[in-house]
């Protein structure tokens, strides 16, 4: 598969696979624990929720989500990078969860499965963002909520990816109003967005 930006998905997978082992360290996640925890608090999860974490990467959110939803909550992480999921596997001491090597554009679940769908630090990397949103909304239950979150603003994210170069050089997060439009077109209502230095947050609810 060739993305709209010209790279093959295999090249992009290769990029994330090759960086998986050092990913958390390179992004300084250990020093950002309180900020990551704050994002999970913003999700407003509840005990026993069923949660799909899309683009889970090394599973950085999984322990925080598990802590909130408890041992009876259902937690699934999907990512297209197998090596990223191998790193996420290490985090499974926090509780049971499934990790699935899959694309967000073809989520391998029937419709109407999850109370919440979370997408942290991954949305810019989806080649077909409209398709990705459609799939995330498809697996949401009625009254379920979709969250997109980053530890940077739109402008900061796009500058960062451009500076990294390679297969992610043009993996841009669209302008906030474009994201709002895409979310509404996917079937979400009550869409709210925050774009400011140090964070981007968006959420919408499925009727």
Image (tube, grey):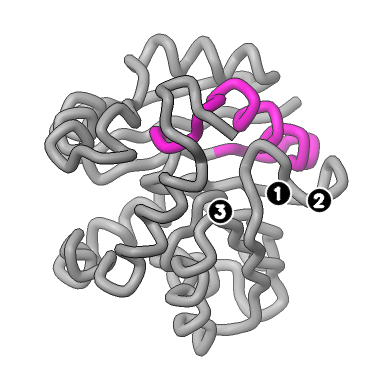
As drawn, the label of residue 115 is: 1
**Which of marks 1 and 3 precedes in the sequence?**
3
Residue range highlighted in magenta? 124-146
The crowd level at tag 1 (other Cα within 10 Å; few <14, some 14-19, many 20+) is many
Q: Residue at x 68, y 60 (%)?
A: 49
Residue 86: horizontal and vertical position, in percent?
49, 76
**Which residue, given by chain and number where applicable, does mark 2 sit on?**
109
**Which residue, given by chain and number where applicable, does mark 3 sit on?**
80
Q: Quadrant of residue 52?
A: bottom right
| In this rendering, the label closer to the viewer, 2 or 1 | 2
The crowd level at tag 2 (other Cα within 10 Å; few <14, some 14-19, many 20+) is few
**Which of marks 1 and 2 precedes in the sequence?**
2
* Side (left or right) of 159 relative to 74: left
**Which of marks 3 and 2 precedes in the sequence?**
3
* Residue found at the very far right of the displayed protein: 110
Q: Give the structural element (helix, strand or loop) at label 3.
A: loop
Q: Give the structural element (helix, strand or loop) at label 2.
A: loop
Q: Quadrant of residue 64?
A: bottom left
| Foreground residue among 182 and 160 | 160
Q: Quadrant of residue 32?
A: bottom left
Q: Kindly report the distance in space between the C-alpha atoms of the residues bearing marks 2 and 1.
A: 13 Å
**Quarter containing the N terminus:** top right
Q: Kindly report the distance in space between the C-alpha atoms of the residues bearing marks 2 and 3.
A: 15 Å
As drawn, the label of residue 89 is: none
| Foreground residue among 163 and 73 | 163
Q: Is residue 59 visible?
A: no
Residue 159: horizontal and vertical position, in percent?
15, 30
């Amino acid at each position: 598969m060739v993305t709209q930006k010209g790279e093959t998905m295999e090249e992009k997978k290769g990029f994330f696979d090759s960086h998986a082992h050092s990913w958390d360290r390179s992004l300084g996640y250990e020093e950002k624990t309180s900020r990551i925890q704050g994002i999970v608090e913003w999700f407003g999860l509840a005990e026993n929720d069923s949660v799909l974490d899309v683009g889970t990467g090394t599973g950085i959110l999984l322990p925080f989500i598990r802590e909130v939803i408890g041992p009876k909550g259902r937690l699934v992480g999907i990512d297209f990078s197998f090596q990223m999921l191998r790193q996420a596997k290490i985090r499974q001491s926090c509780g049971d969860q499934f990790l699935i090597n899959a694309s967000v554009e073809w989520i391998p679940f029937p419709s109407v499965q999850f109370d919440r769908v979370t997408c942290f630090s991954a949305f810019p990397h989806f080649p077909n963002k409209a398709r990705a949103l459609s799939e995330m909304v498809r697996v949401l239950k009625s009254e379920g909520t979709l969250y997109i979150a980053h530890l940077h603003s739109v402008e900061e994210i796009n500058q960062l990816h451009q500076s990294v170069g390679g297969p992610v050089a043009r993996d841009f997060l669209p302008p906030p109003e474009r994201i709002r439009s895409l979310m509404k077109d996917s079937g979400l209502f009550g869409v709210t967005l925050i774009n400011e230095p140090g964070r981007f947050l968006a959420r919408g609810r499925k009727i």
